[in-house]
Amino acid sequence: MSEIEIKNLTKKFEAGGHTVVALDDVNLNIEKGEIYGIIGMSGAGKSTLVRSINYLEVPNEGRVLIDGTDLSKLSDKELRIKRRDIGMIFQGFNLLEQKNVIDNVCFPLEISGMKKKKAREKARELLETVNLSEKEKSYPSQLSGGQKQRVAIARALATNPSILLCDEATSALDPQTTASILSLLKEINEKLNITIVVITHQMSVITDICTRVAIIENGKLVEEGTVEEVFDSPKTDIARELISNKKESYSPIESLKAEKVIRIVFSENSAFEPVISNVILKFNAPVNILGADTRDVGGKAKGEMLLGLPDDEQLQHDIIRYLKERKLTVTEVRDNV
């Protein structure tokens, strides 16, 4: 049995006399202890989905089960107790500005009835976990964005949750700080065996720490699989667009145009040879490199390139076959040049 089961989930909102379908018959299973990514463009429905997991958003149809418990069957009191098992961190940190760091972390513990002395002991342990012990007396206004998010993570862990939901938790951070927060989340996952659900619009976040990924578009789950599978061979246009996001990876050379553009992925299984040079020599035809990048995907080094092929269709077919024979993953790219 999966730790999180989402079955036929539909969520609708009324806006200006119109019905907006934010989630449309979504089905998802998330296993205990994994780091699961949910990615989509702005407005795709991913934040509504993550807020449905802890019933901050109550679906119109479908069910959410946590460890086999159907949240729709719980009373308000039972739901509040169940939510202690589900921590959550946000893009905007949501810290109490009038409280210092340790009091922010203590806040959910004191609400749950823990004595102040014991709550502070627990809070100090958590601040040590997120490497922020020296800031316990500081106020949020005195912290950097990364430090604020570390406080938010410590606070989310205060009730010993088995699940941690991260709603665009790194979107407001610079790349270096994002990397440190993702490293911390991975460390927490390994140390505490907490299931982590990451909501993001950045494929780099998914490839850095997630094991599996679901892609949401217009409220529908359109693609799902291991991160490596989706990265190597995206099946949908939205997956290809997210993977080749120009802002967070390479920037294709705008001056070079091609009728046929392909994306190739290198991995440790690929042949160790100068593939592009060999293609040019073998077929006596120009192949333009429009962009290139390397990434760590699930702990494996992956290289990717955008190639502009000659206009001749038979040549295109022969080049693609040649590349596949050398164990390269090849997919067609649309609207990139």
Image: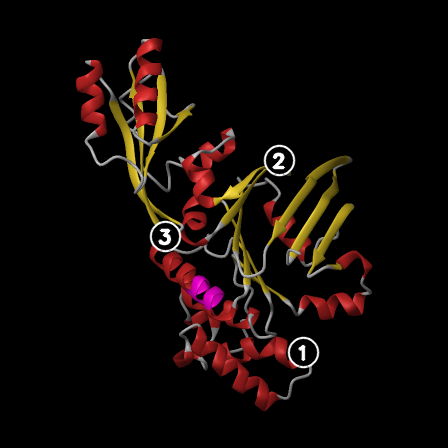
Classify 273 as above or below 52: above
Q: Secondary structure at mark 3?
A: loop
Instruction: Quote the CA–CA distance across marks 1 and 2.
Output: 38 Å
Q: Quadrant of the C terminus?
A: top left
Q: Label 1 near label 3: C-beta < 8 Å?
A: no
Q: Secondary structure at mark 1?
A: helix
Classify 7 as above or below 306: below
In the image: residue 270, left or right of residue 41:
left
Which quadrant of the view contains residue 156?
A: bottom right
Residue occupying the point 49% across, 35% down: 239
Q: Is residue 225 magenta?
A: no
Q: Quadrant of the N terminus?
A: bottom right
Residue 45: give x, y in percent of width and height: 62, 43
Residue occupying the point 71% across, 56% down: 65
Label for residue 299? 3
Please state the extent of the stretch shown in magenta in the rendering: 184-190
Tell me which label, 3 or 1, sits earlier in the chain: 1
Q: Secondary structure at mark 2?
A: loop
Instruction: Quote the CA–CA distance across marks 3 and 1.
Output: 40 Å
Residue 324: give x, y in percent of width and height: 34, 26
Given the image, on which type of amino acid does mark 1 rest? Ile
Tell me which label, 3 or 2, sits earlier in the chain: 2
Residue that badge 2 annotates: 218
Given the image, on which type of amino acid does mark 3 rest? Gly
Label for residue 111? 1
Given the image, on which type of amino acid does mark 2 rest? Asn
Q: Is residue 185 magenta?
A: yes
Residue 92 seen: yes
